[in-house]
Amino acid sequence: MSLALYVATRKGIWIATAGADRRTWSLRDPIFLGQQCHHVVLDPRDRTTLLAASRQWHLGPTVFRSVDGGATWKEAASPPRFPSGEPRGRAVDHVFWLTPGHASEPGVWYAGTSPKGLFRSDDGGVTWAPIAGFNDHPEQPRWVGSDKDETPDGGKLHSILVDPRDPAHLYLSMSGGGTFESTDRGADWRPLNLGVAADFFPPTDDGSERLYGHDPHCVVLQPGRPDRLWQQNHCGIYRLDRPGDRWERIGRAMPTEIGDIGFGIAPHPRDPDTAWVFPMDGGGDWPRTSPGGKPAMYITRDAGASWQRQDRGLPTEQAWWTVKRQALCADALDPVGLYLGTTNGQVWASDDEGASFRCLFPHLPHIYAITVGEPA
Amino acid sequence: MSTRVIVPTQLRSYTAGASEVGARGTTLAELLADLDRQFPGMRFRVVDEHDRVRRHIIFFVGAERQDDLTEPLPPGAAVQIVGALSGG
């Protein structure tokens, strides 16, 4: 058994591999050096296919596919793109997110783009088609907002989730826009944001709750209990237990001096009450760096009722890290391994569920995303 | 008649490393269609869904910059695709 980290950066992709003991990691030479790579994901269904979202500074966006563990890559024959001549004039700037489909649909993948669009492949990522049920939904222009509702390098459609019990049941999230749900394979969608703060908006005239326009940074399904969703939002940390539709702000239990702002959130692969976040400073000018220059993971083992700091091995001062929404993940081993990547190009890991950390690779480019897989 | 097309480094993964290739067409649009037939995928990297030239790509026809893909190409003029300043 081997483990692989897929590190997507502003300047290319790096793959690192280790044995099950996770003690010795070897880093391969870069792939697509110089290209902006937003996500690299191993297909857990065949444990062989890798898809990579890439663009090059000058060139348009595309998706590459490897079926040999990343040794060779082939570009998608038809990468995600909006229909030519569509009235809104949307053009994909970059593919931001990749999600493998349901276990019963081996060739299916989903992609989220900037500007916000949802795409699907039925042939393992070779050809892609827009999902009109979302992209052309009559409410979609209101859901996605304007260019003022976007992250600095463009709005993001991310956190595409597939219910492991039902391939027709999907979730997606947008920065900004909120979280949405479909129960018919993407043909129709509805907002799922009750209980989530959107402090950047004024109150509505009638005092009613806003249904969309929120800013989820990362939403994940609890692997062992897919009725449980965790969310790290621009305005706090939340948990939702379906069939309920009201999120609970579990970040209220975080220490006041740390707050509950951040980008990523990672669920435990087996314990449904355990998840990790990596807080960022959301005060003042929103530096989005480790609070006080002291990086730390926070873990809840009671579904968000309480949080404990985990910082052993991490720098104790003057470490002003930013960890982006795709750059925090957990493996499925026992004990669970945790991985995070910083925008200053460091990969850190824990092989004891956050009890201690060590730096695996200190000198990569700005890290956008880290995923972990168990290649065949 | 084939037009000489000068390919920037960013696109040479499509042309097996060739810095110059030949393509046929009476306009840049036709030329790009022929390039895409020869080198599948190349067109979408330089022109978007709505036939807009991508922000950091410039086409030169002879010595003149050309943003209109429908303008007739003058006979004998080379086409140079340039990756404009960007990145960092």
Image (cartoon, coloured by chain):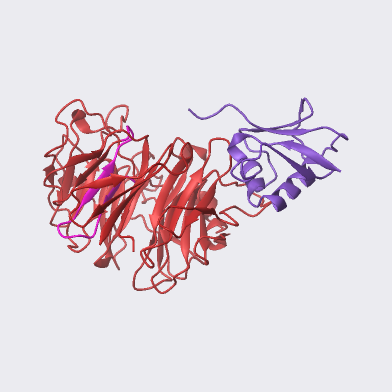
Along the line of sight, the residue nearer the viewer: B23 or A342 = B23
**Depicted A91 relative to depicted A148: above or below:** below
B35 on left or right of A75: right
Quadrant including the N terminus of chain A: bottom left
**Depicted A31 relative to depicted A271: above or below:** above
**Chain letter, purple in picture:** B
A46 on left or right of A350: right
The reply to whether residue A212 is in sight is no
Residue beneath the point at 74% across and 49% down: B33
The secondary structure that most of the magenta stretch takes on is: loop
Residue B61 is covered by the magenta coloring: no
| Magenta highlight range | A326-345
Along the line of sight, the residue nearer the viewer: B47 or A232 = B47
**Depicted B44 relative to depicted A44: above or below:** above
| Residue A253 % position (x, y) | 15, 46
| Residue A54 % position (x, y) | 49, 45
Residue beneath the point at 55% across and 43% down: A93
Along the line of sight, the residue nearer the viewer: A370 or A147 = A370
**Chain letter, red in picture:** A
Along the line of sight, the residue nearer the viewer: A60 or A293 = A60
The reply to whether residue A156 is in sight is yes
| Residue A12 % position (x, y) | 43, 40
Residue A332 is covered by the magenta coloring: yes
B19 on left or right of A244: right
